[in-house]
Amino acid sequence: MNQTSSIKQKAGQFLHILLPILITQIALSAITFFDTNMSGKFGTNDLAGVAIGTSLWIPIQTGLSGILMGITPIVSHLIGSRRNKDVAHQVMQGMWLSLLVSVLVLILGGLALSPVLNFMNLEPEVRDIAFRFLRAISFGIIPLFGYTVVRSCIDALGQTRVSMFITLIALPVNVGLNYLLIFGNFGFPRLGGVGAGVASAITYWVIFLIALIFIYRAEPFRSLQLFRKFHAMSLGSFKELLKIGVPIGFSIFFETAVFSAVTLLMSRFDTVTIAAHQAAINFASTLYMIPLSICMSLTILVGFESGSGRLKDARQYGIMGIGTAAVLSLLTALVLLFAGSHVAGLYSDEPEVISLIQHFLIYAIFFQISDAIATPTQGVLRGYKDVTPAFIICFIAYWVIGLPVGYLLATYTDLGAYGYWIGLITGLAIGAILLLARLVRVQRRFAPEKA
């Protein structure tokens, strides 16, 4: 990354960082998209089973990955303040933490999975598919969290094209394995939705190993001496990483988990409604990769500028990123409004399911506009290392307001399943307003403190 002196230069560097991250996030999201899409083509029960399994797994995966992503602002600040020699130690601590997190997830998941699924009112076949899907994907947990740390370091150095390259390799691997394992082509076992879990686990190992080769052999990572010297666990480094990472992780968890909670609450509806709801959420999550990518870019750029003491530049990047996300959200809203039937047809061949998906996508228009404001704003706050208030705001907006409103509307009005979506819209809108207010306060306070 380079210091910039004009808006034109900032726009160029912003796009240079953003576009590879966007392609990377879309490719990662496409893995889940193809898991859901191809499982749906196999059968409605498989679509519902993978939907339930994904709803349980994604909040845990994204929340814990968010904790590990705390390495991004740490490395950005180190590079901005020219403390390059400290990067290798911090990245190694992130790897130690990822291993501990992986083991903890495997132990707790093994104990809790069956009771959680038994608690839900699922058809036996759907419950069995969800269980076996999650058991299969668990074999990829260690490399997935390890890759999160490595990728966070790569991106923090501004080398986002490397992450893009690795992920673009992974996508055809995942789709190809889905084709073989879901449908049983070329003599492979016909596993249905469970095959999607096996394919994802293998894919996680592939991207982790490729990433390790890159950072060990290629510049500028090689000059940082990453993984060339043993660094024992350091409680002090863990404390710094967790201080930043835990609020980030919980913020992401609260946002993603509320969608999963809605899916779990909707288990009282029939299988067709569950499948349609999850298909709509899946596509909306793919669109969410746009503001999420802008968020990650802003964390890198604002962290670099604030670490260097260039507060005016950090502020300009924030305005640029949030404005870009808002404009793009209006464009994606048009896609959902005018192409909803075509999108729904990607997930199912059954007319009843397609009709329900199309209805859910109309509601998705409104909450993805709120996401376009809230998510990049969180990226700016992370760049300033101001993370705890955002986590509190997300909890209040999504869980204290959004989810209860959705439950009340779905249970005590004629809206039914659509009531949950109105609750999501309400929570996301309130969250966006509160996060913007927090950013204004931080920028006003941060300038005199730095001075």
Image (cartoon, rainbow, N blue to C red):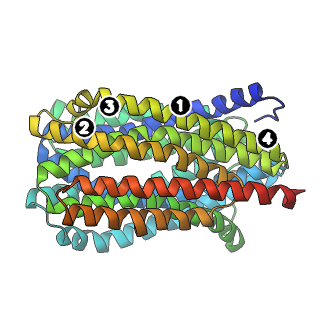
- SS of the residue at dot 2? helix
Determine whether the residue tagged by mark 4 lies in a helix, strand or loop: helix
**Disc 1 marks which residue?**
165
Q: Which mark is residue 313?
A: 4
Label 1 neighbour load within 10 Å: few <14, some 14-19, many 20+: some
Q: Is residue 299 left or right of residue 260?
A: right
Numbered label tally: 4
Residue 194, percent from left and from top: 21, 49
Q: Position of residue 24 (x, y in %)?
A: 50, 36
Left-right relation of 408 to 213: left
Single out the mark in the foreground, 3 or 1: 3
Q: At numbered mark 1, what does the secondary structure look like: helix, strand or loop?
A: helix
x and y percent of residue 68 in the render?
Answer: 57, 58
Q: Name the side, left or right, on which 156 lies relative to 350.
A: right
- State whether residue 214 is above or below residue 87: above
Residue drawn at (43%, 62%) of the image: 398
Characterize the local packing of mark 4: few (<14), some (14-19) or many (20 or more) Cα atoms within 10 angstroms. many
**Where residue 337 is drawn, which disc sits there?**
3
Judged by depth in the image, the label closer to the viewer, 4 or 3, is 3
Mark 4 vs mark 3, CA separation in Å: 37 Å
Tell me the kind of residue under disc 4. Answer: Asp
Q: Which residue is mark 2?
A: 37
Query: Of label 4 and label 2, which has the lower sequence position?
Result: 2
Task: Identify the disc placed on residue 136.
Answer: none
Whole-number angstrom distance, CA of label 2 to CA of label 3: 21 Å
Task: Give the camera-side residue of 110 and 20.
Answer: 20
Q: Residues within 10 Å of mark 2 (few under 14, many from 20)?
A: many
Residue 370 vs residue 37, the one in the foreground: 370
Q: Residue at x 58, y 40 (%)?
A: 294
Q: Are marks 1 and 2 in contact (CB under 8 Å)?
A: no
